[in-house]
Image (cartoon, helix red, strand yellow):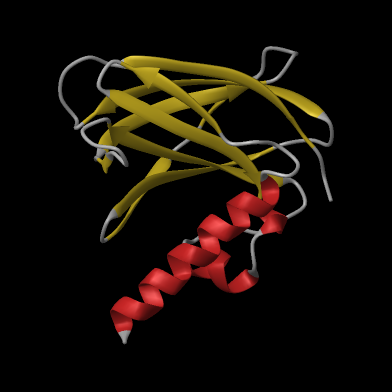
Amino acid sequence: MKQIMKKISLLFLVFSCLISAQVQAEQAQNFGDYTVHYIAVNSTFISPEIAERYSIVRSARKAFLNISVIKNTSDTGTPVAARITGEKANLLGQNSTINFIEVNEGDAIYYIGQFDFSNAENLRFNLEVQPENDGPVYPLTWTTQLYIN
């Protein structure tokens, strides 16, 4: 029963991210044998139950990054652990570090990092991803705009 609840929780989190994809599509970048999927999600898009389960603070001015690393070994790929570090910056050049937690649920491994934002703020994310905690470190950089609901 506990395993079923974990899978249901994972489905809710993925579903929540898909709902937010209507506002901002998930993105991915290939680095040789790995594909890194990333998305910024306003924390109010997820239910209070899911937020509590993953220690995400729901607030109009809080969002989170959801990062996953897939090793391109088959048609579907294999999720792998990674070392994720990075920060966000606004247009004024104000930087803040984003701390990531690893969520490992059976066949899924992903990383969640929460941060504050202002309405319609343009944010630049500068992350470093080291798949399998070994070997090359890949830079992952993108800009997005988040809105308060």
Can you tell which quarter of the image residue 135 is in?
top left
x and y percentages locating residue 107 in the rendered image: 27, 56
Residue at image point 38% right, 70% down: 7
Residue at image point 19% right, 32% down: 132
Residue farthest along the left direction in this orientation: 134
x and y percentages locating residue 148 in the rendered image: 82, 45
Residue at image point 37% right, 72% down: 6
* Quadrant the N terminus occupies: bottom left
Q: Nearer the viewer, residue 37 or 121?
A: 37
x and y percentages locating residue 48 in the rendered image: 63, 70
Can you tell which quarter of the image residue 69 is in?
top left
Vertical arrangement, residue 132 with respect to residue 41, above or below: above
Residue farthest along the front direction in this orientation: 75
Residue at image point 23% right, 36% down: 74
How many numbered callouts?
0
Residue farthest along the bottom direction in this orientation: 1
Vertical arrangement, residue 44 with respect to residue 4, above or below: above
x and y percentages locating residue 128 in the rendered image: 38, 20
- Residue 95 in view, yes or no: no
Q: Nearer the viewer, residue 13 or 25?
A: 25
Vertical arrangement, residue 31 with respect to residue 73, above or below: above
- Residue 11 in view, yes or no: yes
